[in-house]
Amino acid sequence: MTEPPASLTAPHHLAYTYKRSLGPVLGAFFNGLRERRILGVRRANGGVLVPPKEYDPESGESIDEMVEVSDEGTVASWAWVNAPRAHQPLDRPFAYALILLDGAETPLLHIIDAPNESDIKTGMRVRARWADETSGSILDIACFEADDGSKPQPKPAAKADGGDPIEILRIPVELDYTYSAGQSASRLLRGLAEGRLIGQRCPVDGKVYFPSRGSCAKHAVPLSGDPVELTDRGTLVTFSINRVPSENIKLELPYAAIQVVLDGADTTFFHVLGECNIEDVRMGMRVQAVWKPREEWDQSVGNILYFKPLDEADADFDSYKEHI
Amino acid sequence: MRDVAVVGFTQSKVSRREFDRNETEILMPVIQELKKEMNLENTDIDFICSGSSDYLAGQSFAFVAGLDAVGAWPPVSESHVEMDGAWALYEAWVKMQMGYADISLVYGFGKPSMGDLPHTMALQLDPYAVMPLWPDAVSMAALQARLCLDGNVFDERAMADVAVRDRSHAKNNPFAQVSGDFEADALLAEPYLVSPLRKHDCSPISDGASAIILVAGDRVGEFCDRPAWIRGFEHIVEPQDLGARDLTQSRSTAIAGEKAGVGKDKVDVAEIYAPFSHQSILVERALGVGPETTLNPSGGALAGNPIMATGLSRIGEAAAQVWNGTADRAVAHATSGPCLQQNLVCVLEGN
């Protein structure tokens, strides 16, 4: 027996931006950063939390008295990052640190820019290096740096008029994954690249899954290894009319989104219907896949552009009713 | 309190990367094996609860695919927590306490190898002032470790000793990813990964799954000669803000341990979910377990960390020590959140 070929892999890049409303306490903090000032909030016991919270972490009591603290402080702890990851604030070695700012009771998590690990000590004095442009973000503090007693660089002048107060914080998130499709999906996708539709059979009731993810969701068993080759013809079992444009579907609006059972398969799959007036779409219609030109095929279900009606009598309702 | 026992436990062999199987394919044999061992059909199971995280998969509602491994037809009573499966087990236990279920299936699964796990973990931090700095999980743990080292709570050798102990215990665990005989001196000669943490201080990144069967009351005897009875169960959380809590101890573990009754009698075995070596020391101290307790006979999280299943596996491993008569009393611990933010303690007894 030959080893099956390795699973297909594909990159998956997930990127989105949260828009978070700030409210009065965090709003004051981030508007303060835009003006290159660091604000904390006073707790009932007199201590100052930085960054501020709306509630006292011990008592849960509402707190909102904002207090400015220094942009200089003492290193409470630090972690030296030799090999920064993507998206981290610096692309050269640096330290994450807990920094107790003068006037604050709790340390702020930020970074220290230092040439070497040996330049950082717990208890050392550091000061903020502000970004040239501020926008109301924790990154308005570009980093902290050793306070060697020299005169700090003058702060870049804050704009006299910083604009309207920031009420919404935009937080971009980017995550990168490498998906491996697994043996079963890899076989399906490799088949599609050759214009073949490969299903798999459930060993319990013999039903044929297309598309298949390698397991029967009903009986919780792996599908039997033998592939079942299917035709590209089938029966439309249900549909909806789509009037909303989509980047991925090039059909002219409106069109029908359909569930199809391929001949020989026992599960439905989603596609779209073309070459058909929407008034003529009906359950039980016989349909066939329309493929992209062969030279454009890849390992994707997108090789099928859409399904089109076949000039055949409709399927009997009993033959597909269990799929509705 | 209703008598509920852990009667069955299965797990996958954890590995750095499950290349040829998706999450459902990893989970399915684990659940199949458990149902077979327990001679259970879905129709015998009153409640199913799972733990996983969509962020690991990079897909919303990714956990729904996990149900394919259970077979949800005819339809089943099911719930999910976006946490380690240990918390799913807590939910099932509460449901059984309420009398709504006599037999529960609990599972956890994770395939973190698809993404960059330490990076992804930044998303559990304060999203306003902390997450935009993208502090990775190792750096966060390193900040905690340095506070402990600077405060003379313990030293780097004590941390290395945890790794030596756990990796040595893992030699007897056929499911472990990292195991073997190591010398603390040699480990301490290795360079830092993120100072002050070295590689041996960090759990590996692991793909895997585990599953447990809980049974209540009179039916327990049908499944197990020497069941592991849940005699105490609690989970406690601390503030998210690192600055608002004392990172050199685990107060929430101490409170959970006290409420669960850890100190009421001798503890023979403790299975601790500490993703980093120094956190193991903090948890051991918070639980108050001493030299009479065997710690992490399975090797713990340093031997394999299939995140979202690791805590559940601690309960399974602790129960296994009761089943085989090694322990009359075993404690399982699970953690969630950065730097031991949330902690769960489960006390299991043979009598």
Image (spheres, coloured by chain):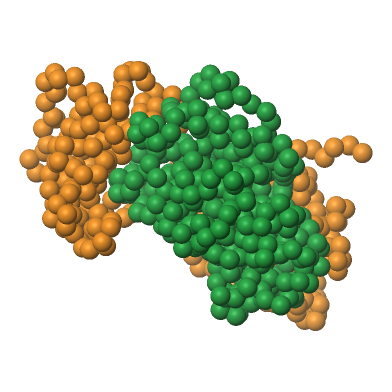
Chain colours: A orange, B green
Q: Is residue B171 left or right of residue B314?
A: right
Looking at the image, the residue that sits furthest to the left is: A160
- Measured as percent of width and height from the top left, residue B212 is found at 68, 61
**Residue A254 is drawn in which quadrant?**
bottom right
- Measured as percent of width and height from the top left, residue B349 is found at 64, 62
Q: Residue at x 53, y 19 (%)?
A: B189
Q: Residue at x 35, y 39 (%)?
A: B133
Q: Vertically, is A83 above or below B350?
A: above
**In terms of depth relative to the viewer, which is nearer, A145 or B253?**
B253
Which quarter of the rendering shows the N terminus of chain A?
top right
Q: Vertically, is B221 above or below B319?
A: below
Q: Is residue A237 left or right of residue A112?
A: right
Q: Residue at x 79, y 38 (%)?
A: A5
**In terms of depth relative to the viewer, which is nearer, A53 or B10?**
B10
- Measured as percent of width and height from the top left, residue B61 is found at 56, 60
Would you say residue A216 is visible in this rendering?
A: no
Looking at the image, the residue that sits furthest to the right is: A1
- Measured as percent of width and height from the top left, residue A232 is found at 78, 59
Q: How many marks?
A: 0
Q: Residue at x 21, y 27 (%)?
A: A125
Would you say residue B71 is visible in this rendering?
A: yes
Q: Vertically, is B350 above or below A241?
A: above
**Residue A279 is drawn in which quadrant?**
bottom right
Q: Is residue A175 left or right of residue A303?
A: left
Q: Vertically, is A170 above or below A260?
A: above
Which quarter of the rendering shows the C terminus of chain A?
bottom right
